[in-house]
Amino acid sequence: MSQEKKNILSCIQPTGDIHLGNYLGAVQNWVNLQENYNCTYGVVDYHAMNMLYKADQLRQNSWKMVFQLMACGIKAENLFIQSLVPEHSELCWILSNVCSFGELTRMTQFKDKSEQKKESDKDAFISSGLFFYPVLQAADILIYHADLVPVGKDQVQHLELSRNIAQRFNHQYGKEYFTHPEPLLTVNAKIMSLADPNKKMSKSLGEKHYVNIFGDENRIRKQVKSAVTDTGESEGMSAGVTNLFTLLKACNKQEAHDHLMEQFESGTLKYSELKGEVADGLVELCTPIRERYQEILADKKQIKGQIKASSAEIRKTAQKTLREVKDIVGILNPR
Ligand code: TRP
């Protein structure tokens, strides 16, 4: 680890597939950050336990997420699976004592998620894990002394909590031990559904709403072709056309973007031409990712070995932190 580089840490839950919206909104940024920072990225399976799930599926999803992140360009040596670094949950317990009940009750994500569940079923089971998970998130971050945490807006409050926990720990034990992590806000494109451009692209909306970046070229072309352009706006650019221009830019087709934008402004734009350019751009973007994914799937066993090794390597940092923390708080260290 080089000294002058800052530490970056971020994590993703192993739920489902990475689609185009996730890729352009977050994962691509993670890939690029690897050039200039010490990056550590986790597939956080312990976090995925607070909603109903099937044990076998969770294990499969964790590996699938690893394969997909690697296909997108995350280096194996920067990647770990949370359950292969059990120190996170141990640190979580220690940190729970410098996090107040009141702080956790103010987390808007918990309020939103638990209300959503109750709306669909008034007797829904709200686990205390759902309530408590920001403390585990703080442990994920603080255990690697992360300086920067690339996240979306929805995680800013959790980041603030992590900072408060670090501060309170340092104050209580009279030692500037934990780094105060800062969010690195992802300013990337927000990609909307092609079938309903007023909604954010998401897997839960259904098949036709998200672009599978690992899927075949024809499907991508078909989806773009049938993208909704007219959403009933009376003036200005419709949400659907805006989304297509956003995609063009996100695929690095700046020239085509500017050229077609001029046509839009002069009222001569043909949607079929815009769609053709977007489809070409997306196919160019996704083809190498899909090919790498196929290679990885053909070599699963070796890749799993790599990730177990990188997790073991990353674990050394976590173990060092936990040992130091136990010394500070007066807990014994096992041999
Ligand atoms: N809570 C994050 C989410 O739901 C995932 C996450 C867990 C995370 N631990 C983290 C993100 C640590 C950044 C850093 O998306």
Image (cartoon, grey):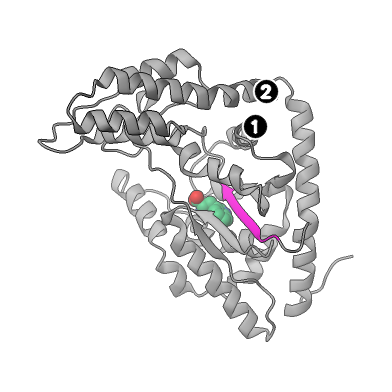
- Mark 2, Cα crowd under 10 Å, few <14 / some 14-19 / many 20+, is some
> Of 211 and 46, which appears nearest the observer?
211
Q: Residue at x 38, y 22 (%)?
A: 277
Q: Residue at x 72, y 54 (%)?
A: 86
Q: Residue at x 40, y 43 (%)?
A: 189
Count of marks, rendered view: 2
- Of the image marks 1 and 2, the number of the one nearer the N terminus: 1
Q: CB under 8 Å between callouts 1 and 2?
A: yes
Residue 10 colored in magenta in the image? yes
- Identify residue type, mark 1: Phe
> Of 138 and 119, which appears nearest the observer?
138
Image location (x, y in percent) of residue 92: 63, 64
Q: Which residues are magenta?
A: 5-12
Please indicate, yes or no, whether residue 36 appears anywhere in the rendered image.
yes
Q: Is residue 11 left or right of residue 156?
A: right
Q: Secondary structure at mark 2?
A: helix
Q: Which mark is residue 67?
A: 1
Image location (x, y in percent) of residue 100: 50, 75
- Quarter of the picture containing the N terminus is bottom right
Above or below, 221 relative to 27 = above
Q: Secondary structure at mark 1?
A: helix
Q: Which mark is residue 47?
A: none
Image location (x, y in percent) of residue 156: 45, 61
- Identify residue type, mark 2: Leu
- Quarter of the picture containing the C terminus is bottom right
Q: Is the C-beta of the residue carrying label 1 under 8 Å from the nearest atom of ligand 1?
A: no
Q: Pointer 2: what residue? A: 297
